[in-house]
């Protein structure tokens, strides 16, 4: 199937892109790597009157290392992160996460900003960025704002983006003595996750953060798991499982036995990996 006809614009600046999205007659959407949107359009699950191509905007390709934190532009591809072509505040976590997204051909074009904006309930970046407590930079008709990654994705394919707004990029703090682990279960290599967990802890940084994706809704922090792991160098497998199940009861109350098993396995493995590093 082919997509319905649409208008195409390639603005030169963020201001121009926002103006095009805001002023468009009918529906308008930004397109970045096109790895999800073009498929949805070809299947006619998404019908758009105007595509605004933001993939080459210099502001969205920025990579900045400000010592205490790093800014990663929204148009940074999964492959660039996988290949270590970004300043890395995560000591390798982001490269590992990127390497497990889809296939290399998709990673060459798909972007971290597009993945967050799409907010697929099984996408990898939302879990990684909320575990890292990242902030999202957003530009729109009313100017620029920063939001916590944890608040940015609000449901399955839902974000807090308002009409005309685009994601500029992500700010991630550098942490001292950071340890991390991640685990993903999918039915075949390159497929979206049935479950994917990220665990991050750092010296003097408050609660460890365990995040889970592959839920029916959106990536979430597991607060009881973080609290249980805090200040405990040795974790009791039974107590850890109980903490995970408590969080799952709240976050995925409708999970079946297979899903629960996957989630318990990925969260436990992510923590074990972090502690072994
Ligand atoms: C076969 C296959 C397997 C995949 N497997 C995985 C997987 O295992 N894990 C995973 O996480 N992902 C997976 N993906 C998704 C892939 O990572 C996509 O690249 C990603 O979800 C979208 O990024 P994109 O840059 O291509 O966005 P696009 O397709 O260009 O856009 C996606 C959506 O985001 C919006 N958008 C894009 N950029 C911005 C921005 N800067 N600001 C605001 N809105 C924006 C668009 O309007 C659109 O609604 C898979 C995709 C395919 C086709």
Image: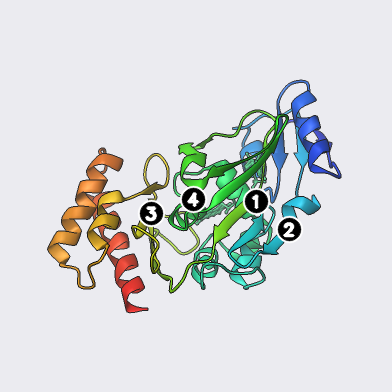
Q: Percent from the top left, x then y, of residue 235?
A: 19, 68
Looking at the image, the residue that sits furthest to the top is 25
**Which is more N-terminal, label 2 or label 4?**
2
Q: Is residue 252 something that shows in the picture? A: no
**Circle 4 sits on which residue?**
126
Q: State how far apart marks 1 and 4 are (Cα).
A: 13 Å
Q: What secondary structure is marked by label 1?
A: strand
Of the image marks 4 and 3, the number of the one nearer the N terminus: 4
Q: Reply above or below: 138 against 4.
A: below
Mark 2: which secondary structure?
A: loop
Q: Which residue is mark 1?
A: 169
Report the mark closest to the observer, 1 or 4. Answer: 1
Q: Residues within 10 Å of mark 4 (few under 14, many from 20)?
A: many
Residue positioned 51% across, 73% down in the render: 91
Contact check, label 4 and label 3, Cβ < 8 Å:
yes
Name the residue at 33% across, 57% down: 207
User: In which quadrant of the rendered view does residue 238 lie?
Assistant: bottom left
Q: Quadrant of the N terminus?
A: top right
Mark 1 vs 2: CB contact within 8 A: yes
The mark closer to the camera, 4 or 2, is 2
Q: CA distance from mark 1 to mark 2?
A: 8 Å
Label 4: element kind: helix
Q: Which residue is mark 3?
A: 211
């Amino acid at each position: 199937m082919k997509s319905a006809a649409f208008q195409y614009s390639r603005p030169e600046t963020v201001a121009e892109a926002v103006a095009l999205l805001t002023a468009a007659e009918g529906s308008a959407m930004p397109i970045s790597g096109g790895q999800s949107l073009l498929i949805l359009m070809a299947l006619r699950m998404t019908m758009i009157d105007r595509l605004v191509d933001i993939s080459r905007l210099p502001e969205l390709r920025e990579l900045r290392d400000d010592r205490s934190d790093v800014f990663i532009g929204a148009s940074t591809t999964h492959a660039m992160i996988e290949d270590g072509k970004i300043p890395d505040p995560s000591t390798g976590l982001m490269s590992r996460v990127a390497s497990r997204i889809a296939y290399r051909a998709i990673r060459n074009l798909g972007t971290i900003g597009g993945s967050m904006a799409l907010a697929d309930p099984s996408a990898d970046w939302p879990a990684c960025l909320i575990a890292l407590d990242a902030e999202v930079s957003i530009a729109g008709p009313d100017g620029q704002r920063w939001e916590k990654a944890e608040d940015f994705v609000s449901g399955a394919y839902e974000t807090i983006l308002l009409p005309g707004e685009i994601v500029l990029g992500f700010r991630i703090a550098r942490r001292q003595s950071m340890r991390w682990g991640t685990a993903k279960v999918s039915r075949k290599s390159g497929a979206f996750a049935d479950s994917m967990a990220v665990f991050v802890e750092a010296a003097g940084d408050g609660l460890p953060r365990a995040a889970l994706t592959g839920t029916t809704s959106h990536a979430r922090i597991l607060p009881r798991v973080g609290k249980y792991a805090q200040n405990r160098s040795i974790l009791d497998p039974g107590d850890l499982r109980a903490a995970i199940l408590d969080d799952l009861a709240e976050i995925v109350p409708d999970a079946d036995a297979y899903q629960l098993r996957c989630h318990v396995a990925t969260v436990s493995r992510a923590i074990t990996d972090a502690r072994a590093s």
